Amino acid sequence: MTVSQNFHDQLHRVQTFIAVVDFASYTRAAHYLGISKAMASLHIKALEQALATTLLVRTTRHIGLTESGQDLYDEFKGIVATIDTAFDNVLHGRNRVSGKLRISSTAEYAQSFILPILPLFTARYPEVRLSYHFNSSLNDLVAEKLDLVIRLGHLPDSGFKGRRLADYGILLVAAPALLQGLALTQVEDLAALPWIGNSNLAGPPAWSFQHPRRGQVELRIEPGHESNSATAIRALALAGLGLAVLPEWLVLDDLANGRLVQVLPEYSLARQPVHVLFANSPHLPRKSRVFIDFLAEHLGRA
């Protein structure tokens, strides 16, 4: 076997290893790489034999890394990403934008802001194939091998890079029937009412309201019902099951038609950011860069 052939084989094995770790699945990694599950397993075994160490511990429900496996993953994750980007640049030319772009966002934001502008992007870059996923978790950036994820609100610290694209207003709303007969004059009056929580939010639920005379008032709540979907939270609010904080663009029609009312409108909530996040790797593929710039161009003026 030649040196170049040995390098080629080892590179394929390392790529398979990284995919198995990222997907936490031999089956999904093999599908992503375009090889059989049996071949993926053979790649891992050959890599372990070459290194004379166990890299993965596999049970019926979980794939875990040994200490050596973690070291190998940390060493090669960025290297493999750089090689993939370099091949893409050489194959397609540095000024050519092509390939599959895997992106994700919440369904509600996509339907209002992202999906309507995608035809403009594909017209500008006809050789890019879009693969759109709806999710509200950051885990899918690695688990689903996505290129970019668009997320709403203030984000917890993570190892991802990001760019702020826009912001949006949020409102405290409720069904009129829920408020019937109640005399609500200040934020503190809301503590005894039922709330619908957003399970995507980290930490104890709390909201900071701004009043022109009272200044900032913070209220900690104990949600009864909750969901990770803004659509579901809106539906629960429409059913009169509690107060809800929702994006302004999602409830404008409900407010106009009286299905929902804004609660204590003299108290405002801070606008929320929209970010696009991507892997913390040395080289961002050109298809990702141009899509980020495209989003900033259009969402910044939305």
Image (cartoon, rainbow, N blue to C red):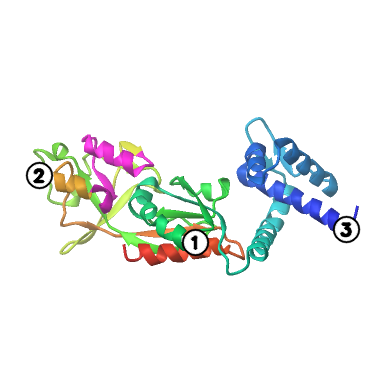
Residue annotated with mark 1: 125
Left or right of 101 on screen, residue 66: right
Spatial CA distance of label 2 from label 1 is: 56 Å
Q: Is residue 237 magenta?
A: yes
Q: Residues within 10 Å of mark 1 (few under 14, many from 20)?
A: some
Spatial CA distance of label 3 from label 1 is: 39 Å
Residue annotated with mark 3: 3
Left or right of 161 on screen, residue 300: left
Q: Is residue 164 visible?
A: no
Q: Is residue 178 visible?
A: yes
Residue in the image at 65% along x and 58% along y: 81
Q: Position of residue 4 (x, y in %)?
A: 85, 58
Looking at the image, is mark 2 or mark 1 earlier in the sequence? 1
Looking at the image, is mark 3 or mark 1 earlier in the sequence? 3
**Label 1: which secondary element:** loop
Looking at the image, is mark 3 or mark 2 earlier in the sequence? 3
Residue annotated with mark 2: 183
Residue in the image at 22% along x and 34% along y: 239
Q: Is residue 270 magenta?
A: no
> Which circle marks residue 195 in the picture?
none
Q: Residues within 10 Å of mark 3 (few under 14, many from 20)?
A: few
Left or right of 146 on screen, residue 220: left
Q: Nearer the viewer, mark 3 or mark 1?
A: 1
